[in-house]
């Protein structure tokens, strides 16, 4: 457990220094090739859990120390151990013993007694400490104060449930490859493999228990993909007919490109600015037996990639704050700063303006974000329509005017469908 705590503490400390958890974990797997599947799962759980509940755990730790812990890795070790004590089944004596050893490795033998005192004190006074932590918003919800305030002002009725949904374990949801089989047929395959699942209204299949993808029947041979139910609205909204020219402007890693291609025979150009991420689109399409033209380009710089032929359909799955998917990426709530949201909104506006030029007359552009902040969603679209007299917003969006709030079925998304008149 000691090595696992140590790696988790270093990883959480690096997140708090501004790095992405996904990238950090990829590094950990590369550097520690000897870790078993179980160890990897444990490290992942400690990092995800500690970040999910970071506000509450820090509010507890603050009460247990007379002055802030100076060394970030030591502070994060204590957060990780508190997470284990409060939220996992790990044997408390083992959590404390190993954390004490780890503290000595991180900050010297004199820290053993300190770590021991902090953790034992938590065990003795748990209820009082948690009660005080829960008295503050950041402690109760485990989000930065600005995030909580923003949601409360934009979604006064839903803020509490949205904040709580963002701290839940996300469901694992599948999309059957319609070219190969129906959702019902795949549901039967899951049942024969002993996996329980339910079919959601849009044919997404939600597993009762997440499993590693290589255990999904037919995954390697392209019968199924993993995709949140909220993301599975794209193909039906875009309404692509066979033979249409379609642009997927921000395509990587290719979940939505594949979804579009599975529903018909379209001529799809998939762009992404990130060459490494674009390679993931290719492997997704290869696995599913689908074909698209892929190009690494900045979608906003038309002169670098556009041949002048308009597109019948454009999907702009824009770079965004990802505030709707924090339960899958709990580092996001601690990495984002309030000013980032305006930055994303400006970038989204530029992409919208540029890509509107490539939409054919009567053609449609579907704008999507996995953000739940209004500035990146409705406000951005209202500003865009005010600048573009030939753009009109089409109705019939999912959720409340296109806003899907995270719940037990899906993550948070925003959809707006625009038609060129
Ligand atoms: C939300 S993700 C797309 C997810 C993808 N549509 C899917 O469903 O798998 C946004 C993507 O936009 C790409 N991106 C950001 N700015 C871009 C730009 N100016 N031009 C093209 N791609 C861009 C990022 O590299 C990232 O892969």
Image: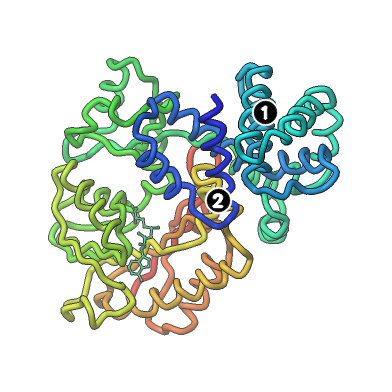
Q: Residue 185 appears at what percent x and percent y?
A: 24, 26
Q: Is residue 38 left or right of residue 217?
A: right
Say whether mark 2 is within 8 Å of ligand 1.
no
Q: Is residue 84 above or below residue 158?
A: above
Label 1 SS = helix
Q: Nearer the viewer, residue 270 or 396?
A: 270
Q: Residue 195 appears at what percent x and percent y?
A: 36, 19
Quadrant into which the N terminus falls: top right
Which of the labelled discs sits on residue 130, or is there none?
A: none
Between the residue at mark 2 and the residue at mark 1, the CA separation in whole angstroms equals 23 Å
Figure quarter occupied by ligand 1: bottom left
Which of the labelled discs sits on residue 100, or is there none?
A: 1
Q: Residue 298 appears at what percent x and percent y?
A: 31, 73
The residue carrying mark 2 is: 15
Q: Is residue 69 above or below residue 219?
A: below
Residue in the image at 16% along x and 57% along y = 292
Q: Residue 150 appears at what percent x and percent y?
A: 68, 60
Q: Is residue 146 above or below residue 210?
A: below
Would you say residue 8 is visible in this rendering? yes
Task: Between label 2 and label 1, give the one nearer the viewer.
Answer: 1
């Amino acid at each position: 457990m000691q090595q696992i705590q140590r790696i988790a503490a270093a990883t959480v400390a690096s997140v708090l220094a501004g790095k992405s958890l996904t990238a950090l974990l990829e590094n950990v797997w590369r550097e520690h090739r000897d870790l078993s599947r179980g160890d990897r799962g444990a490290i992942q759980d400690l990092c995800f859990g500690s970040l999910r509940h970071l506000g509450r755990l820090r509010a507890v730790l603050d009460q247990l120390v007379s002055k802030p812990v100076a060394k970030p890795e030591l502070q994060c070790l204590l957060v990780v151990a508190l997470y284990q004590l409060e939220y996992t089944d790990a044997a408390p004596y083992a959590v404390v013993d190993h954390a004490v050893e780890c503290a000595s490795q991180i900050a010297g033998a004199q820290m053993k007694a300190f770590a021991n005192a902090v953790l034992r004190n938590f065990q003795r006074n748990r209820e009082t400490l948690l009660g005080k932590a829960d008295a503050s918003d950041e402690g109760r919800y485990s989000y930065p104060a600005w995030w909580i305030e923003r949601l409360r002002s934009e979604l006064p009725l839903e803020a509490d449930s949205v904040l709580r949904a963002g701290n839940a374990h996300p469901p694992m949801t599948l999309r059957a490859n319609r070219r190969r089989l129906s959702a019902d047929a795949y549901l039967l395959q899951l049942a024969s493999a002993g996996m329980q699942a339910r079919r959601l209204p849009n044919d997404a299949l939600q597993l009762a228990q997440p499993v590693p993808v290589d255990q999904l029947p037919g995954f390697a041979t392209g019968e199924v993909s993993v995709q949140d139910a909220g993301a599975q609205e794209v193909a039906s909204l875009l309404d692509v007919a066979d033979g249409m020219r379609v642009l997927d402007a921000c395509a990587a890693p290719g979940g939505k490109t594949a979804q579009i291609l599975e529903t018909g025979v379209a001529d799809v150009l998939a762009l992404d600015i990130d060459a490494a991420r674009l390679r993931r689109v290719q492997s997704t399409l290869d696995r599913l037996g689908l074909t698209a033209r892929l190009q690494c380009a900045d979608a906003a710089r038309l002169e670098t990639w556009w041949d002048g032929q308009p597109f019948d359909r454009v999907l702009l799955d824009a770079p965004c704050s990802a505030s709707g998917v924090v339960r899958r990426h709990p580092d996001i709530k601690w990495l984002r700063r309030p000013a980032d949201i305006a930055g994303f909104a400006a970038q989204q506006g530029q992409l919208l303006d540029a890509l509107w030029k490539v939409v054919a007359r009567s053609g449609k552009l579907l704008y999507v974000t996995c953000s739940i902040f209004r500035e990146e969603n409705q406000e951005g679209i209202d500003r865009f329509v005010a600048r573009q007299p030939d753009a009109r917003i089409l109705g019939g969006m999912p959720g409340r005017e296109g806003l899907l709030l995270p719940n037990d079925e899906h993550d948070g998304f925003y959809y707006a469908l625009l038609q060129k008149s």
